[in-house]
Image (cartoon, coloured by chain):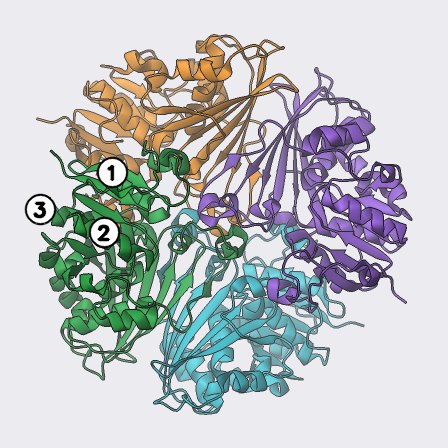
Chain colours: A green, B purple, C orange, D cyan
Amino acid sequence: MPPSVAVFGAAGFTGALAARLLHAHPVLELRWVTARSDVGRRLDDLYPQHRVPLELEELDLERHGEVDAAIVAYPHGASATLVAELRRRGVRVVDLSADFRLRDPALYAEWYREHPAPELLAEAAYGLPELYRDQIRDCGLVANPGCYPTASVLALAPLAREQLIEDVVIDAKSGVSGAGRAATEKTHFVTVDENVSAYGVPRHRHTPEIEQELAALGCEVRITFTPHLLPLDQGELVSCYVSSNGALRDVDLQGMYESFYSGEPFVEVVGSPPGVREVRETNFCRISVHRDPRTGRALIFSAIDNLWKGAASQAVQNLNLMFGLPEGLGIS
Amino acid sequence: MPPSVAVFGAAGFTGALAARLLHAHPVLELRWVTARSDVGRRLDDLYPQHRVPLELEELDLERHGEVDAAIVAYPHGASATLVAELRRRGVRVVDLSADFRLRDPALYAEWYREHPAPELLAEAAYGLPELYRDQIRDCGLVANPGCYPTASVLALAPLAREQLIEDVVIDAKSGVSGAGRAATEKTHFVTVDENVSAYGVPRHRHTPEIEQELAALGCEVRITFTPHLLPLDQGELVSCYVSSNGALRDVDLQGMYESFYSGEPFVEVVGSPPGVREVRETNFCRISVHRDPRTGRALIFSAIDNLWKGAASQAVQNLNLMFGLPEGLGIS
Amino acid sequence: MPPSVAVFGAAGFTGALAARLLHAHPVLELRWVTARSDVGRRLDDLYPQHRVPLELEELDLERHGEVDAAIVAYPHGASATLVAELRRRGVRVVDLSADFRLRDPALYAEWYREHPAPELLAEAAYGLPELYRDQIRDCGLVANPGCYPTASVLALAPLAREQLIEDVVIDAKSGVSGAGRAATEKTHFVTVDENVSAYGVPRHRHTPEIEQELAALGCEVRITFTPHLLPLDQGELVSCYVSSNGALRDVDLQGMYESFYSGEPFVEVVGSPPGVREVRETNFCRISVHRDPRTGRALIFSAIDNLWKGAASQAVQNLNLMFGLPEGLGIS
Amino acid sequence: MPPSVAVFGAAGFTGALAARLLHAHPVLELRWVTARSDVGRRLDDLYPQHRVPLELEELDLERHGEVDAAIVAYPHGASATLVAELRRRGVRVVDLSADFRLRDPALYAEWYREHPAPELLAEAAYGLPELYRDQIRDCGLVANPGCYPTASVLALAPLAREQLIEDVVIDAKSGVSGAGRAATEKTHFVTVDENVSAYGVPRHRHTPEIEQELAALGCEVRITFTPHLLPLDQGELVSCYVSSNGALRDVDLQGMYESFYSGEPFVEVVGSPPGVREVRETNFCRISVHRDPRTGRALIFSAIDNLWKGAASQAVQNLNLMFGLPEGLGIS
C-alpha cells in the first residue's frame, strides 16, 4: 500500500500546489484535501491549472487523520494546534507555517506570539534538505522553511560554515504569489502592475529564521533583511551583500560554492546572476557568487520559485526523505 | 469666481482621477471630494500619484451641495438618487454611472433594475461630445458614456450614419482598472497576470447602450459584444467586425472616417491598428479602419484609456462644454 | 534501442521547447540539436530553464541525418528543402513550419511563395491528432498545425462537421512568444508592456489553413481572422463568433461539444470562458461554447499554450502517434 | 523671441521624451529633432504617444546649430564631440550622456575610455538641481546625472552632508526603458517578463558617479552598487543600506530628511517605502528613511521615473534654470 497523504489548507496557493504535486506523485497517494474556506468546491474548479479532481472538505480529524502523512498549510499560530493533534495520531507532518521553524520559543514569542505547542519543538527538523537531510529522514515533524530563508540560507551557507560573514545585507525581491491568495489592496493588479516597493520595513518575520540558521552554521550575525514586491507571479530573488573585514579577498568563492553544493540535486551554482525565470515551476535554487574587488564584499544572488522550492515542492522533497523515497520523486 | 465642483464617490479609480484632473484644472475649482469608504483619509494618501491634498468626506449635502457642478462616480442604481437631489439644488451634474445613459426606462429595467428616477431621463444628454456636443452645452445633466460604448460608438459612428452596418461583432479588450478598485479574486494580480479570458458572456450591460447609439445614428442592429480582461492596467481596445451585404466594397473607408472626424480634437484616425499605449493617460480615441477584401467586411480598431476618455477625462470634457469653456481645458 | 530524434532549428522558442520535451521523454531519445545561429553554444546556456545539456551544432546531414525521426523548426520556405532531404534518408519528420500544411500548392503560392517541394504534399498528414489521428499513425511526414489554426479548428470542428457555420469571425489573442525569438521593435518589452493591438490586418497567413480544415470538415466558408498581440509570454486565446442563419437556436451546443471531444485526452470542454493560464505549459486545449440568445450566434472560446499545444508538445504528441507510443508520453 | 531648442539624438527613449516635453513647453520652443537612425521618419510616427509632429533629421550643424540651447542624447563618448562643437557656437547644452559627469578625466578613462574633450570638464555643472542649483543657473554646459545617481544621491545626500555614511550598499531596481530602445535579447519581452535578475555585477559605471557626489558632500566612501532589471517599463527604485558605526542611533532621520528637502519642489519625503508608480511620468523623487533598530542601519528607499527625473524631465528642469525660468515649467 502506498503511503497516503492529506493536505490540510489546500485552498491557498501553496497548499493547492502541494496537492497538485502529490496528486501526480508516482508513490505517495493524495487522499484528502481540506480547507477552511471554499469547502465543497472542487480543487480543479478553484485552480483549473492544477487539475486535481478532489473536493475541498471541512476538517474532520476522524476521517482525515487516518493518513500516513500530512502537509499542513495553515496560517502561523493556527497550524501548531492541528499539527499537535496529527502527531498524537502518529501522522507524519510537514508544516508549511512558521510555527516549528524557530527552535527557541522565546524568539517565536518575540516575533509572532506565545507558542501554542512548545513541547513539539524538540522533535521538529528544519526542512532544508541541503543542510538537514539526515535529520529529516524518518523524522515525524518537519518545519518547512520560509521562502526567503530557503533562498537566503542556501545563498549564505558556504560562507557561514567558514565563518566568513561579518555582516550581511539581504535585499529580497518576490513575486505576488508570495503574498497569498487573499484579495487585498496590496495584491490588486492595479497596485502591483508597473510598480515595485519595499515592505516589512524594518522588521520582517523571516529575519530571525535566517539568523538562526546562520548561527547553526557557525555565524552569529545580525542581518539586515528587506523584501520587495515585484510585478510578477512566481519567483524570488535574494541579493546578499556580505562583508568580512577583508577575509574574503583571497577566497576562491566560485570553487567554495561549487564544492559545497557538489552532488546536491536541487542547487545549481552558476557563473552569472540568475534570473527567476530559470527556476520557475521547479524545485531548483540557482546561485551565483561574485567578488566586488573595490569593497572586498562577496555578492551572492539566489533564485527560487517561492511556491515550489520556497514552499510546496520542498515540502514534497521532505516527504520523500521522510519515507525513504528518492528525493526528487514527483518534483523533477 | 471660478465655477466650483465636487466629486462624489472619489475613492474609486474614476472618481479619484476626475478629482486629479479638476484639482489641476485652470478654471474649474475642485471644492469637495466625498466617498462612502475611506472617509477621513486624504486622497493623496489613497492615490499618491494623483497628488490631490484633500480629505475624503462623508456626504453632507448641506455643505457639499453648495457647488456649481458635480461629477458623480457612484455605482449604478445608487447614483440616480444623489443626482436627483443635486439637480433639485440646481447643481449641474456629469454622472459616470449607467443610470442616465439609456433613454428608455424599460430597457434600463431589463438590463439593470427599475429606474430610480425616470423623470430625469428626458433632460439628460448622452455625454459623447463628438456626437452630442450641442446638447451637452448648457445642459444640466450629462450621462457620461460607458468606456466600451465610448470606444465602440466612436469606432462605428461613421458607418452607422451611412446605414452601412448590417451586422457587427465587437470584441473588446480592457485593462484591469476597468474592473474597479474592489479587491476580488478577479482583480488579484495572480489571477490576471499572464492571462486573458472573456467575461460577461453572452450578456454584458454595455450592449444596449451601444445599440441605442447606433440606432440614434440610423442603424437598428443587434450587436454581439464580448469584453475580455487583459494583463494591463489602463487601456481598452475594441475590434469591430462589420458586414453589410457587400455595400462596403466600394466605400472609401479611410476617407469616410477622416472626413467624419475632421476637426474633432480628440479623435485620431490613423493608418494602422492602434495600440492602447498610444492613448494612455490621454483623452484621445485612436481609430483605424480596414477592408477585408476576402469577406467584404470592414474592420475597425478603436483604442482609448478606459479611465480617461472612457470615464474621467471625458467627464471633464463634458464639464468644459457645459460651462462654455474650451473643450480640452485641463485634459490636453 | 529507443528511437532516436533530432531537433533541427533548436535555437528558436519552439525548437528549444521540443528539445526539452524530448530530452525528458521516457522512450524517445534526443540525439542532436542543430541551429543556424548560436552554433557552439549549449542549449542549457541559451535556455537555462530547459536544462538540456547539449551543444547546438551546425547542420551536417551525414551525422545528424542518422536518426529515426526529426522535428524541424525552420522558417517557412527553408523547411521544405531540409524535410525533403530527411525523407530521402527515411527519417520520419514532424515539420513545424507552414510548408506542408496547405494541401494545395497554388494556395501555398498565393499566401507564401512557390512551393519548394510540392511532390511531398501528398504524403503529409495534418498533425492535429483530434481530427487526423489515424493518418498520423505510421505516417512519414506530419505537418504540425499553426498555433492559431490549432486553437481555431478545435474550437470550430464540432460546428463545422454539422455544417453549422455560415459565417465566422475569429478574434485571436496571443502572447509575445508567438512572435519568436528575434529581437525587434515589435518584441521589445517597452513596445508590448501595457499594450495591445491587432496585427496582420487584414490578411494573416493562418487564414487559408483554418479555411482548409473547416472545408475538410464540410464547411466551405470564408473566415475573418484577426490576431492581436498581448503583454504576456505564453498563451493564446481565440474568440470565435459563429452565425448560421438561425440554425443554431435549437442545438444543444454544450452537449455537442462534450460529445465531440469525449475521450479526447487533450481537449477540455468547460462551462465558462477559459483563461490561458489554465493551459499554460500544457498540451491541453480548453474550450467553452455559448449561445448569444439575442443574435442567435454561437460564441466559442478556445485557449492553448502557443508554444506547447500550438507547437512543440503537439509535435511530440504526433511523434508518439507515429511510433505507436501512448499519445501523452512525455507531455502530460 | 522665445529661446529655441534642439534635441540631438531624439530617436531614443530619453531624447524623444525630451522632445515631447519641449514641444509642449510654454516658453522654450522646440526647433529641431535630429537622429542617427530613423532619419526622415516623423517623431509622432516613431513615438505616437508623444504627439510631436516633427521629422527626424540628419545632423547638419549649419542649420541645427542655430539654436539657443540643445539637449544632447548621444551615447557616451559620441556625445562629447558634438557638445564641444555646440559650445563653440555658443549653444547652451544639457548633455544626457556620462561624458561630463565625472570631474576627473582619469576616472572617466578608468570606467569609460580616454576623455574626448577634457578641456570642457571645468565649465560643466552637475545637473542635480537639488545640490547644484546655483551653478546650473546661467551655466553653458550641464551634465545631466545618470538615473541611478539621481535616485541614489538624493537618497543619501542628507546623511552624506553630515558625514554619517561609513558604508553603504545600494541595491537598485529599474524598469526596462532604462536599457534603451535597442532591441536585443536582453530587452525582448520574453526575456524580461516574469523575471528579475542583477546585471552589471560587480562593476556598474554609475558607481564612480555616485561616489564622486557623496565625496563632494563630505563622505569619501567606496560603495557597493548593484542594479537589477524588473518586468516593468518606467520606474526606478534604489534601496540604500547605510551603516555608520552606531552614529545613526540617535539621529532624527525623518526630521533630518524633511529639513534637508524642505522647499524642494521635486523631492517628496514620505513616511513609508515609496512605490515607483507614485512617481511615474513625473519629475518627482520620492524618498522614505527608516532606522533598523537591530543593526543600527539607516534604510533609505528612493523612487523616480528613470526617463523623467532620471533623464528627460530633469534635463528640462536644468534648461529652465539655465534660462532663468520657473524651475517646474513644462514638467509639472
Query: Sequence-wise, which precedes: disc 2 or disc 3?
Result: 2
Query: Residue under circle 2?
Result: A85
Task: Tell me what residue is drawn at x 28 percent, y 65 percent.
Answer: A115
- Spatial CA span between label 3 and label 1: 26 Å
Whole-percent x, y for residue D68 in the image: 70, 74
SS at mark 3? loop
Residue D319 in sight from this viewpoint: yes
Which residue bears the numbered disc 1? A63
Name the residue type under label 2: Glu
**Element assignment for label 2:** helix
Please report, as a chain letter, where disc 3 is located. A
Please identify, in this view, whether the residue under mark 3 or under mark 1 is nearer the observer: 1
Query: Which residue does the image show at 87% across and 58% down from the upper left?
Result: B68
Q: Which residue is mark 3?
A: A324
Sequence-earlier tag: 2 or 1: 1
**Quick check: C22 left or right of C208?**
left
**Residue B281 drawn at (x, y percent):** 65, 53
